[in-house]
Amino acid sequence: MSTRPFAEQGPDIDIEKGTAFAPRFDRDGLIGAIVTDARSGEVLMFAYMNQDALQATMESRIAHFWSRSRGKLWRKGEESGNLLNVEELRVDCDQDVLWLKVLVSGAGVACHTGARSCFYRSAALGEAADGRLTMDAKQGKQPKTP
Amino acid sequence: MSTRPFAEQGPDIDIEKGTAFAPRFDRDGLIGAIVTDARSGEVLMFAYMNQDALQATMESRIAHFWSRSRGKLWRKGEESGNLLNVEELRVDCDQDVLWLKVLVSGAGVACHTGARSCFYRSAALGEAADGRLTMDAKQGKQPKTP
């Protein structure tokens, strides 16, 4: 691969206030990425990138991740056609989490279960908190409406 | 504390399709939580919870986290007044990431730098990717407009 489009963290880099992109990969060489729908703002999924996945994502503008279960680089949607087209890439204050705003190709489904978003269940809070989840009625295998 | 408002993961629980809230804590006993603004949908921050933090969050509807740097339970905003009032708590398909939709109290600032969101910088993509970040013009120390 070509030169990485990001730097190593070091004493000469102002992580919080600077303009050098110097993502912090954890002890496993990974950084978490929050993926939201660029139009609706809905959180679609959360996955991990290693350095190669981040570089491939930035160069191709198609989201790539590191599959921890399969131990390989993973171009999300390469089999289903639901590729994630990256509109915007953001990083947080201490540069240890990424935020990708994407447009989903194909059927618009981001979750392997067939749901549009992986976050298709909510938990009750406060007095009502009983350890049960409520499934979204509108989620399911139907494609996203345009 | 009282009985936990969530279950242990086990063979009798359908993690993906079931309605039992059985969050998966990692080898450090933590689970990541994505925090978005319940009104704008903007991602504000990402932090970690242990079991006590999740229980306190669910019972009080005020977000609590585990501070990895300080090694203690952390009621976000307890000093600044920028408490995170949890409107909705969601969990992803394999129940290893949480999503909190919140309303921020006080000055509406979620980041310790004084920015409304921790994600105040974006990285260039594709041909333009040069390892530099662009700071949001509208971010800063000014309070959120209502």
Image: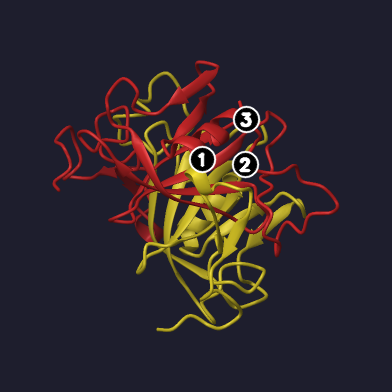
Chain colours: A red, B yellow
Name the front one of labels 2 and 3: 3
Q: Are marks 2 and 3 on the same chain?
A: yes
Q: Image height check: is A126 above or below A88? A: below
Image mark 3: chain: A
Indicate the position of residue A37 as horizontal and vertical percent values.
Answer: 33, 49
User: Disc 1, disc 2: CB below 8 Å?
Assistant: yes
* Local SS, label 3: loop
- Residue for badge 3: A2
Image mark 1: chain: A
Q: Residue at x 20, y 41 (%)?
A: A139
**Mark 1 vs mark 2, CA separation in Å:** 8 Å
Indicate the position of residue A76 as horizontal and vertical percent values.
Answer: 39, 29
Tell whether B88 sits left or right of A9.
left
Three-letter code for the amino acid on which mark 3 is drawn: Ser
Q: Are marks 1 and 3 on the same chain?
A: yes
Label 3 Cα crowd, 10 Å radius (few <14 / some 14-19 / many 20+): few
Indicate the position of residue B84 as horizontal and vertical percent values.
Answer: 50, 67
Task: Looking at the image, tell me whether mark 1 or mark 2 is earlier in sequence order.
Answer: 2
Name the image quarter holding the N terminus of chain A.
Answer: top right
Label 2 Cα crowd, 10 Å radius (few <14 / some 14-19 / many 20+): many
The answer to whether residue A4 shows anywhere in this view is yes
Rendering quarter of residue B31: top right
Q: Are marks 1 and 2 on the same chain?
A: yes
- Residue for badge 1: A58
Q: Is A22 or A47 nearer to us in this picture?
A: A22
Three-letter code for the amino acid on which mark 1 is drawn: Met
Q: Residue at x 38, y 60 (%)?
A: A127
Three-letter code for the amino acid on which mark 2 is drawn: Pro
